[in-house]
Image: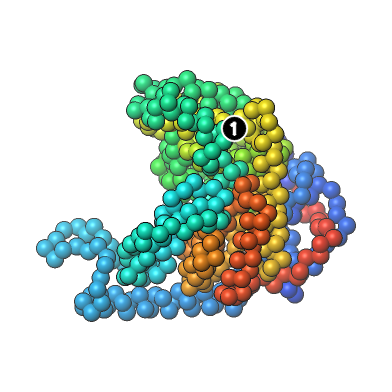
Amino acid sequence: MTESSSTKLLNGDACRRTLNGKNASKNGYVKNHCLFQQSQKYSRSGEKKQNATHNPSLYKKPFMEYFEETPLLVAVLTYMGYGILTVFGYLRDFLRHWNIEKCHVARERDEQKDFVPLYQDFENFYTRNLYMRIRDNWNRPICSVPGAKMDLVERVTHNYNWTFEHTGKVVKDVINMGSYNYLGFAENTGPCADAAIEVTQKYGAGVGSTRCEMGNLDIHEELEELVARFLGVESSMAFGMGFATNSMNIPALTGKGCLILSDELNHASLVLGARLSGSTIRVFKHNNMQSLEKLLRDAIVHGQPRTHRPWKKILIVVEGIYSMEGSIVRLPEVVALKKRYKAYLYLDEAHSIGALGPNGRGVVDYFGLDPRDVDIMMGTFTKSFGAAGGYIGGKKELIDYLRSHSHSAVYATSMAPPVAQQIITSMKTIMGEDGTTLGADRLRQLSENTNYFRRRLREMGFIIYGNDDSPVVPLMLYMPAKIGAFGREMLKRNIGTVVVGFPATPIIESRARFCVSAAHTREMLDTALEAISEVGDLLQLKYSRREKPLPSLGWMSEESLLQD
């Protein structure tokens, strides 16, 4: 994207500021984001609605998000748990130092003590003494298609998770509640698999060259034309790796003298790309439009540090669905701010493309916005499309610029032909161009499954984060001992889950993350919910202090808090 193209990409518009109100309830604290166009007649007690905006020109549908505060007692016990683990960790390190306890950690040999150390003992403290206790919950080998159900290779450890041995047995038909298989296209039968097999026979499994040399196939160009049409943009470009799509393209778009405004919960690939660009980075609070507008205003008023010259570019970087929070970006407000302050907008739709919107076209489709309002549309094919890689979509000038300036485009090997065909077939299915209603059926099934799963968990008394329409469902665990216990107990009941803790989340916000799929049947979800409730009672995970929802009541918005 060149400097001269900025006038083509940006135009002005008015934006209203959202005020954040905090109302305590007798039944606990709940951070609710509730956005409405039409008025509602009822309000549920025991909850707090935060960041409510009522500009009908911005939001055309209800926008519900839940972020219940951590109960004070749970927070105290969580900190105590980490404190106890830390004390015992130092004690075990002392025993290892004197060879009283066997040490399995990679260490420098004595004859290398004068060299620059390769391993920093203190930096690895968490890995040695906390992560190892629950390491058996990750990297489990799967020996089947990771669809709605999967098969796991059974393994055991005889040295407290330092090493594992396979028993030779296979755990069959584990309900998969952890994969990003939102639309159920991760399968080895059906139209996608058949088309991928046919393309493999024609082109082979790999290309062996970059796009700009001998690796540009007609199937790649077909894919990019289809993606551009799917997104509603002028042009697009496909990449072989989703992570590199962010980390290698952001440095091509911004550099020294540019400002990047990044959401505090952005993915590591976005963070890495921003750091590699050499731009100045400022972080705004998650989905907080007041924080973002303040940074934008300060950037316009003060300019660059020391010189106070205007920034060459201001790039706002956000995600469609945040993969650890289950929240959806407040895109209408972000777009309004972007237009008002003449900034660029980079939207990462890794988790939202295919999973949101009436047509499966992501968060832009979900809010009914014009794709031209987003300057750089990024997404991955690894989730909803059951494939690999990523894409950038936008104006033709932008894509032509990236083809010659992006490291991921110039130096990376081209996408494998069967992967490209998997994306083409699944995308055409979503668009209905295969002559069937399979894509529309899967979109509808995903939406129904998501709302049902979230509602049932909330009714059970669990603290659930995120938006009602987000298929990413975080269930709060908090305490470190419950991270490993939850994963193990769920696997005993033949449910595969993902558990996440510090440092991937704040230290007191450990969680289990469920990913709902269109491939899940109602019976599968009921089986998983029954197991979750049983484990929740066993581990005392039903922390929510919200009042039980009244099934027949709707939500009522507060009075408008917006000012020009």
Residue nearest the viewer, comparing 87 with 543? 543
Residue sitting at 54 percent across and 77 percent down?
76
Is 202 situated above or below 324?
Answer: above
State the residue position of label 1: 427
Q: Is residue 298 left or right of residue 82?
A: right
| Farthest left residue in view | 111
Is 217 situated above or below 244?
Answer: above
Residue nearest the viewer, comparing 117 with 190? 190
Residue nearest the viewer, comparing 97 with 433? 433
Q: Is residue 455 left or right of residue 512?
A: right
Residue sitting at 75 percent across and 42 percent down?
58
SS class, disc 1: helix
Q: Is residue 472 left or right of residue 241?
A: right
Q: Quadrant of residue 211?
A: top left
The amino acid type, in three-letter code, at marker 1 is Met
Q: Position of residue 86 (x, y in %)?
A: 39, 75
Is 449 situated above or below 256?
Answer: below
| Farthest right residue in view | 41
Residue nearest the viewer, comparing 292 with 551? 551
Q: Residues within 10 Å of mark 1 (few under 14, many from 20)?
A: many
Residue sitting at 49 percent across and 67 percent down?
488
Q: Position of residue 218 (x, y in %)?
A: 47, 20
Q: Quadrant of residue 326?
A: bottom right
Q: Position of residue 339 (x, y in %)?
A: 65, 36
**Whether residue 313 can be seen here:** no
**Whether residue 34 can be seen here:** yes
Is 125 situated above or below 58?
Answer: below
